[in-house]
Image: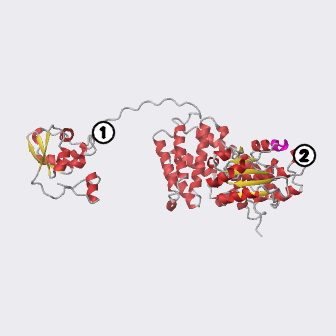
Amino acid sequence: MAEQALYRKWRPIAFDEVVGQEHVVKTIRNALASGRAAHAYLFSGPRGTGKTTTARLVAKALNCTHPDPAQRPDNTCRNCVAVNEGRFLDLIEIDAASNTGVDNIRDLRDKINFAPGEGQYKVYIIDEVHMLSMGAFNALLKTLEEPPPHAVFILATTELHKVPLTVASRCQKHTFRRIPAAEVAGRLGAIVEREGLSVEPAVLDLLARQATGSLRDAISLLDQLIISPDEKVTLDGTLKVLGTASGQAVQELAEAMLAQDSSRGLDLINNMAEDGIDSRQFARQMVDYLRGLLLTRLGNAALVDAGAETRKTMHGQAARFDPAGLVQAIKAFNTAANDSRSGWLAQLPLELAFVECLRIGSTGDGVAPAAGTEAGATPSPRKAAPPLPPPPSTSAKPQSGSDVNLSQITARWADIVSVSGRSHRNLPALLQWCKPISLEGEIVVLGFQNEVLLSKTNTDQNRQLIEAALQQVLGRSFKVRCVLNSAQTETLPDVSSDGPVAEAIRLGGKLRK
């Protein structure tokens, strides 16, 4: 027979054992003690925070036979023992993910009128209630609003926004919060002590942070690490099993960012990838650490969940970071943490995030302007940089009028076409289908082989734009005249590969005369 999982073995059996949800427990206990239990509850919050466990405790307290309501559940009466052993007939747990249809709810509605068989109340726990179909919700509405006196509904969900308001408004709502890492570590320590296990304290802190507020996840990770009760669980072994980088590696990468040391940072990332560390997990660790640096830099160090040594390192590094640069770095690593498209090279998003942080720092936006500036201090304004000299012109030097001839205009025609596109993006597509055929004094004659293109190009606005392009490229004023050149060859001229006319030809289009 398989051994019972730790999270099931150490599931709370009394309200006092529920961790991190005092605001919910106190309200429910007071209501039960005064005999004012609601007919329907809606528990919402992240996974592994105690929603289903609290629902079972409510069911147990409602059916407990202890004479003092404030002492329920006592875990000694027949009904409490039956609930703890999973054989209490009047506690019905329904997985909404597997019973989403209208027929499932109709079956529940038909059976709810039968009196309880063992206790005083029939308690229906519907887990992940947001998975019900809209038809199932509608079928549940009337029963949820006016259930029989012996029936109590407890709905649990991780996605409250998916529960229809018509359902939520008929329930007493309680919101479960993520459990602080310190409380998770404390609960893990109690389990380790009762189990007689040997676990390094640093392991418990790591598991608490890895679980991100889910006590069940933390206990499951602890269960995964226990190979033998006689073998000590160490931090190094835990890091390898979980595929997690050490806190020192995270701090070293942040230090490489501060030092603008790309070689050191990329070596760290690739060494971790070779050691089997999950790159996305490491990116999440970087986000968490950089967030801590940002909070410390802004004077909110009390919000950072870290040990004394880590806090000391954070204070030193935070003073050297600029808040704006930290914001950009957090965004970069958060993108890497959510990038699942680089499976063939898992560390690539992490490398790109690191390089992006170096780029930010190289512009002066990522690192504090002076190493001696204290965290939270206002940096002195920077001096304005001297104006940059204008970039050299890419156009040819102006040529004197006697030097410009038709062959030169033809040789520079591609540049003229390109310059014309700066004022009118569609004009180059038309000019690619003509060419200078003669120079009559101050007039450049453009020959078109197609009347359609000639008519579209030969407008006052287009001619002025072409004349301006000629002036910019050749350094001399010309007038433009557009004519139909019947002697021009029927062979299509070379066109730009990215022009709209070229694209039309590639797709099978033809010019009509």
For residue 499, say whether it is visible.
no
Is residue 104 rendered to the left or right of residue 442?
Answer: right
The main secondary structure of the magenta stretch is: helix
Q: Which residues are magenta?
A: 30-35
Q: Does 32 lie within the magenta span? A: yes
The image quadrant where one finds the C terminus is: bottom left
In the image shown, does 143 or 426 lie closer to the viewer?
A: 143
Q: Does 510 lie within the magenta span? A: no
| Residue 323 to residue 109: above or below | above
Given contact means CB atoms under 8 Å apart, are the residues at marks 1 and 2 in contact? Answer: no
> Residue 69 is drawn in which quadrant?
top right
Looking at the rendered structure, the secondary structure element under dot 1 is loop
Q: At x 78% / y 41%, what residue is drawn? A: 27
Q: Mark 2 belongs to which amino acid?
A: Asp
Mark drawn on residue 337: none
In the image shown, does 454 or 186 lie closer to the viewer?
A: 454
Image coordinates of residue 144 in percent, x first then y, are: 72, 49
Q: At x 49% / y 39%, what residue is drawn? A: 365
Q: Mark 1 belongs to which amino acid?
A: Pro
In the image shown, does 318 or 126 lie closer to the viewer?
A: 126
Is residue 470 rendered to the left or right of residue 508?
Answer: left
Reading the image, the residue beneath label 1 is 391
Image coordinates of residue 218 in percent, x first then y, are: 71, 54
Mark drawn on residue 68: 2
Mark found first going from the N terminus, 1 or 2: 2
Q: CA distance from mark 1 to mark 2?
A: 88 Å
